[in-house]
Amino acid sequence: MYVLRWGFLLACLASILIVAWGGRWEGRLHQADRGTWILDLGRAPIWAPPADPSYASFRDNFKESQDFPVEGTTQMTIGRVMRIDWMVTDFLLYLWPVTLIGGLGYLAVRKGRRSLILHLGLSIGIGLTIGAATCLGLWLLFGGWGAPAPNFFGGMGSVMGIVFGLASFRSDGSGRIDARWRQIRSILNESDRDETTSLDK
């Protein structure tokens, strides 16, 4: 259980580092009265972003665009943007198998022992699975260029997994409250009684 718990935490940390190492970037050329042209800059670490794209890079990629602005046009800006939304999607895709594998390992080796971290990992994995199934189902039902709002469904699945995991961890399976939580509650109650007594004095 100890090795599995630390392995799970390290895998979660590795997911964050992998996403940070392969940050998503895009260049944007914006012209006030014409709109915005977007150029994919590929992946680069968030601490070493790619250089801002040049006007020539946009011109070469959008040479067939009739509305593309001429170099030197007023109110035209060129910049670089980190696509955090894409990186969140990447993180959820890495986190999904990590939580499922860690959770299934937890079920296999627990033998009556309990771990809040691994229990939450399993619940988050289940929540992400439900979120992914819902997102994919809506995509197949309504169609479109891509799955609708993957970060929303992934985030909701994670939150619901945490809530369900905390609630189910408190129960020992027979409806009784886990001894740890009873102990914490008794400590808080004792603290409240001490404060009340001191105020009465």
Image (spheres, grey):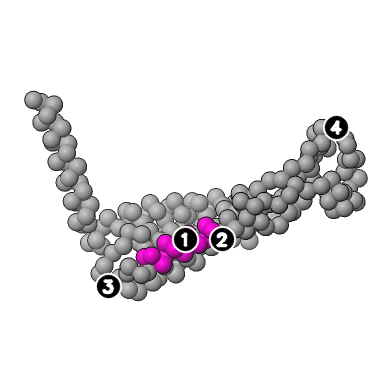
Task: Please state which of the two labelled residues, at mark 3 or mark 1, is closer to the viewer.
Answer: 1
| Distance between mark 4 and mark 3 Cα atoms | 70 Å
- Dominant secondary structure of the magenta stretch? helix
Tell me if label 3 and label 2 are in contact, CB under 8 Å: no
Earlier residue among tags 2 and 1: 1
Residue holding disc 4? 74
Q: Amino acid at mark 4?
A: Thr
Q: Amino acid at mark 1?
A: Cys
Residue holding disc 3? 111
Task: Please state which of the two labelled residues, at mark 4 or mark 3, is closer to the viewer.
Answer: 4
Residue at x 82%, y 32% (from the top left corner): 75
Dot 2 crowding, Cα within 10 Å, few <14, some 14–19, many 20+ = some
Q: Give the side of residue 160 with respect to residue 199, left or right.
A: right
Residue 12, which numbered label?
A: 1
Kind of element beneath mark 4: loop
Earlier residue among tags 3 and 1: 1
Q: Quadrant of residue 120?
A: bottom left
Q: Position of residue 98 (x, y in %)?
A: 47, 65
Residue holding disc 2? 18
Earlier residue among tags 2 and 4: 2
Instruction: Reply yes or no: does residue 152 show up in magenta.
Output: no
